[in-house]
Amino acid sequence: QNIGLVTSNLSLHAPSQIAAAIKSQASRRHFNVMMSMIEQPDPEACKSAVNNLLAQRVDGLIVNIPLESEQARIINEMSGTVPVLFLDVSPALNLDSIIFDATAGAHLAVEHLVAQDHQRIALLSGPLASVSARLRLEGWQQALAKHQLTAVAQLQGDWSSQAGYLQTLALIGQGITFTALLVANDQMALGALRALNESGLAVPGQVSVMGYDDTEDSACFIPPLTTIKQDFKLLGSASVDRLIEQIRSPNMPVQATVLPITLIERKTTA
Ligand code: IPT
């Protein structure tokens, strides 16, 4: 039997590790995975990818594309009796989904920095067209507000290390002093570390950096990155297991699952 996976660009580390985890679990369960990748997040491209996979007679679909609730509902309708599981949607969406707790992740990151006495914190968010990027940003802002703090600067990148590098250089160029940088993913944090290094700012001596994802390479950054772990292996196995259940028992009630996150303390915060 076949699982269809519609995924965001696999040159990004998180979607690539999620796809690998889905593929491994599917193999263990003797399911085949057919994949369709979308280069830039775009609801129309997502719809045609879904239609392609449906035409190839997949038994169920996993959609790891950032989608607004309205778009997710359209895709769910299009799929008819083929079950669909969404991995990058709002927790308020009343459709089958498994997502990580973005609010808790963002709060944990802020609490860690505030506990280390940081007050001048800059934010580097993901692309605000992505639900998850917005949830992380809102979570940071709420958590800062709880401590009567506001961010000293707010920048936005497209999740790539290049964007992390360029945005951090721009931030440093603005001359705003900051003692900590909250970054919405590890890949942008990698670029941020390079920018700080080239600008002669010591991490964590002068600036602390907090990532998000805990993708596999983050432990090998210089210095090893402190980050919020989203357990992609767990997501992969939970989503394949859930989809197989949905395939086997078609009338299961809708279930929106939220997976926990954890803080991985390494060497970029102090
Ligand atoms: C999300 C990652 O956290 C981020 O780094 C980026 O790769 C993004 O995916 C790409 O869409 S994880 C997602 C399941 C919310």
Image (tube, rainbow, N blue to C red):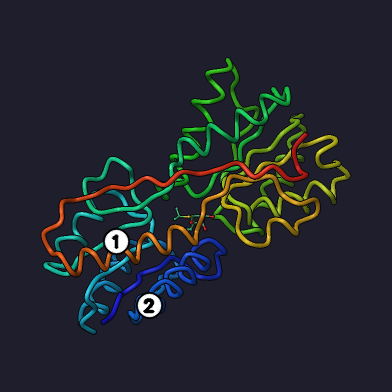
Horizontal and vertical percent position of residue 139: 48, 33
**Quadrant in the rendering for residue 58:** bottom left
Q: Residue at x 52, y 28 (%)?
A: 141
Horizontal and vertical percent position of residue 54: 21, 77
* Picture layout, residue 12 above or below residue 73: below
Disc ID at residue 77: none
| Secondary structure type for disc 2 | strand
Q: Residue at x 61, y 37 (%)?
A: 123
Horizontal relation, residue 252 to residue 229: left or right: left
Camera-nearest label, 1 or 2: 1
* Picture layout, residue 68 above or below residue 246: above
Going by the numbered disc 2, the residue's amino acid type is: Met
Q: Dot 1, crowdedness within 10 Å: few (<14), some or many (≥20)?
A: some
Q: Extreme top residue here?
A: 148
Horizontal and vertical percent position of residue 259: 41, 47
Is the CB atom of the residue marked by disc 1 within 8 angstroms of ligand 1's nearest atom? no
Say which quadrant the C terminus sits in: top right
Disc nearer the start of the sequence (1/2): 2
Q: Extreme bottom residue here?
A: 56
- Front residue of 233/9: it is 233
* Picture layout, residue 24 above or below residue 184: below
Disc ID at residue 35: 2
Horizontal and vertical percent position of residue 72: 25, 55
Going by the numbered disc 1, the residue's amino acid type is: Arg
Q: Residue at x 41, y 76 (%)?
A: 28
**Residue marked by disc 1:** 242
- Front residue of 85/26: it is 26
Q: CA distance from mark 1 to mark 2?
A: 18 Å
Say which quadrant the N terminus sits in: bottom left
Q: Dot 2, crowdedness within 10 Å: few (<14), some or many (≥20)?
A: some
- Front residue of 17/236: it is 236
* Picture layout, residue 148 above or below residue 246: above
